[in-house]
Amino acid sequence: MMSRKAPFLSTTLMKAVVVSKFGGTEVLEVKRNVPIPQVQNDEVLVRVAAAGVNPVDTYIRSGNYGNLPILPYIPGNDMCGTVVQCGNSVENFREGDRVCSFRTVGGAYAEYTTVKEQHLLKLVETYDFVKGAAVGTPFLTAYRALFHDTSIKPGQKILVHGASGGVGVPAVQMAAAHGLEVYGTAGTEEGMEMVKKLGAKYVFNHRKEGYASEIKLAANNEGIDVIVEMLSNVNLARDLDLVAKNGTVLVVGCRDMIEINPRLLMTKESRIQGVMVNAATDKELHESVSFIEAGLRNGVLDPVLGPKYSLSDVQQAHEDIIHSYGSKGKMVLIL
Ligand SMILES: NC(=O)c1ccc[n+]([C@@H]2O[C@H](COP(=O)([O-])OP(=O)(O)OC[C@H]3O[C@@H](n4cnc5c(N)ncnc54)[C@H](OP(=O)(O)O)[C@@H]3O)[C@@H](O)[C@H]2O)c1
């Protein structure tokens, strides 16, 4: 059953980025005559102020992803804004609430979108919408990597391999808050400085020759208990060398094939585990959202904003999130 129509809107049309065929960045078109989505019973309609850009948005846009949307579609999962209408069965949110999300029904790169109630977080009062748009997928992913189906213990050594980007930032913050000894990497001095400030004890430059030997030395040649890997196609073989006996490599990011020597897994009885944020059950999502909301409120977690782009620069944003380096936090589109 559809809920009541939104009486507050003077128009039924909105501005949004629309993809009508899969391909390069040129398929991202800003259109002004897109119908505002109708809210369903268990959804809210949000007036979007800012949207987070994630690497997965580019994989989907190019058609290189397992689960593709039906064309045409509006890209994006992460957004932040104000609730303007609630479906009839929505219980915990009301019109005027400031919210952010990691999964939308209508797509995030748009003036309005619909979101299921269980995919909403309440925005921290002191945050502006742009900062709120930096939460979403990266925080959910970091939580899933660290705390779902692993046995990470305080005092263990963790390497966040790619700590300066969207997922790396919350992974470092969560690991430090959990009492782990955090090792992080970034590709620039500025990125390294930021990772250190986030709570890493040791920071390395993943573009510097021989940095893996420096990591080994810092870990007293004991190995790293848990490695959170953002670029497995480049680093997995190195990770299997760095990981401790009985340690775990968590594959979060991977963009190509890589050859590894499985013998390394045998000698250390170590393991490689995949991480997929979208595989979380509703119960796990509730757990993640509860943890993240609490962490943001008490300041243990704090999103770091990276580059900001206007909606009209969406093509450049997609180009940059894949091809530029020197990450310092999360990329956001301003609506
Ligand atoms: N499995 C899942 O559910 C899931 C969910 C979200 C994201 N992901 C994937 O995880 C990866 C990271 O996502 P993100 O949002 O953090 O992307 P991002 O914001 O673009 O950050 C990319 C990170 O990778 C680092 N990096 C670059 N070269 C590296 C290297 N040789 N070794 C180690 N790290 C390197 C970057 O550091 P510098 O720029 O400082 O060099 C930066 O810290 C992406 O591939 C994304 O698709 C997976």
Image: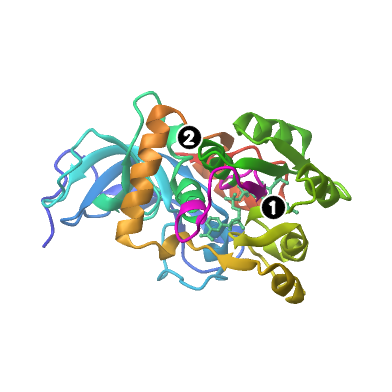
Pinpoint residue 156: horizontal percent, then vertical percent: 61, 47
Residue 135 x/y as whole percent = 45, 41
Quadrant, the N terminus: bottom left
Residue at the spot of label 2: 301
Question: Going from the N terminus, do you reach mark 1 or mark 2 first?
Answer: 1
Describe the element under mark 1 as helix, strand or loop: strand
Mark 2 neighbour class, 10 Å CA radius: few under 14, some 14 to 19, many 20 or more: many
**Residue 78 visible here:** yes
Residue closest to the eye, 52 or 291:
291
Q: Secondary structure at mark 2?
A: loop
Observer-side mark, 1 or 2, equals 1
Q: Position of residue 143 (x, y in %)?
A: 47, 50
Q: Disc number at residue 106?
A: none
Disc number placed over residue 224 in the picture, else none: 1
Q: Please give left or right for residue 116 compared with residue 173 in the image.
A: left
Report the magenta residues as a range. Answer: 145-167
Of residues 261 and 104, the one nearer the viewer is 261
Q: Residue at x 40, y 41 (%)?
A: 292
Residue 38 lies left or right of residue 215; in this view the side is left
| Magenta stretch secondary structure, dominant | loop
Seen in the picture, residue 140 relative to 329 is either above or below; the reply is below
Dot 1 amino acid type? Ile
The residue nearer to you, when weighing 190 against 49, is 190
Q: Say what amino acid the circle numbered 2 marks.
A: Leu
Magenta span contains residue 162 = yes
Whether residue 104 is visible, yes or no, is: no
Q: Quadrant of residue 239?
A: bottom right
Q: For this view, does 129 lie left or right of residue 270?
A: left
Instruction: Please tell me which residue lies in front, 38 or 186.
Output: 186
